[in-house]
């Protein structure tokens, strides 16, 4: 008897348990599909709504102006999709920290939801979803635009 005799060079092919392999193979496309749907559906929901257009001006005297309003306020519904159409005019200064922006449209507590938009000279259009929490929010200009900049703000009421 040859003590250490081995079955030379043959290693066993570990056959995959067919049931498990088949299960995985069938599961993976479904998980992928579910992920895809979970990504697409919310954006379709957003795109599917006709966005209401809200227009205002970020003017050269460093004030936000809403047509027909003395103290500009915009009112939106919670989670409403809004297309903002903002006409911006260069104030007395440009802020080097905001290159190319004559003003900004910023709500500090909603920055992570897109409420921090650089306003360029001329027409600016952007779509945002109103926050889910009702209340009054302060829209501010963060780009130092000259005289009046510190008071450049308006209110957004979420109902
Ligand atoms: Cu400003």
Image (cartoon, grey):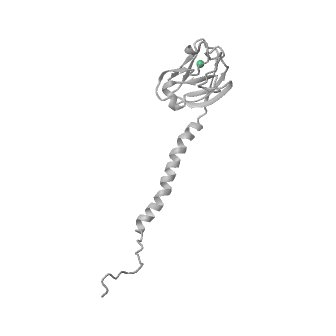
> In the shown orientation, is residue 30 left or right of residue 61?
left
Q: How many marks on residues?
A: 0
In the image, residue 90 sits, relative to residue 48, either above or below, namely above
Instruction: Classify residue 139 by image quadrant.
Output: top right
Residue at x 55%, y 24% (from the top left corner): 106
> In the shown orientation, is residue 46 left or right of residue 124?
left
In the image, residue 35 sits, relative to residue 153, either above or below, namely below
Estimate the x, y position of residue 76 in percent, counting from the top left: 54, 24
Residue at x 60%, y 26% (from the top left corner): 98
Instruction: Classify residue 5 by image quadrant.
Output: bottom left
Residue at x 49%, y 55% (from the top left corner): 30
Rendering quadrant holding ligand 1: top right
Please, which residue is most extreme toward the bottom here? Answer: 1
In the image, residue 26 sits, relative to residue 95, either above or below, namely below
Q: Nearer the viewer, residue 111 or 1?
A: 1
> In the shown orientation, is residue 119 left or right of residue 158?
right
Please, which residue is most extreme toward the right here? Answer: 122
Estimate the x, y position of residue 148 in percent, counting from the top left: 59, 12
Quarter in which the N terminus is drawn: bottom left
Estimate the x, y position of residue 65 in percent, counting from the top left: 62, 16
Residue at x 55%, y 14% (from the top left corner): 150
In the image, residue 61 sits, relative to residue 30, either above or below, namely above
Estimate the x, y position of residue 32 in percent, counting from the top left: 50, 53
């Amino acid at each position: 008897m040859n003590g250490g005799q081995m079955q030379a060079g043959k290693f066993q092919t570990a056959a995959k348990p067919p049931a498990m392999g088949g299960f995985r193979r069938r599961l993976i496309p479904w998980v992928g599909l579910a992920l895809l749907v979970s990504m697409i559906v919310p954006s379709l929901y957003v795109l599917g709504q006709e966005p209401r257009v809200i227009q205002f001006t970020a003017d050269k005297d460093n004030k936000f102006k809403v047509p027909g309003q003395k103290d500009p306020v915009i009112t939106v519904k919670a989670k409403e999709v809004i297309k903002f159409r903002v006409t911006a005019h260069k104030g007395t200064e440009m802020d080097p920290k905001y290159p190319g922006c004559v003003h900004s449209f910023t709500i500090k507590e909603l920055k992570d939801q897109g409420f921090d938009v650089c306003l360029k000279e001329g027409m600016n259009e952007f779509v945002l979803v109103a926050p889910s929490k009702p209340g009054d929010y302060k829209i501010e200009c963060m780009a130092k635009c000259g005289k009046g900049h510190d008071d450049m703000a308006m209110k957004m009421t979420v109902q």
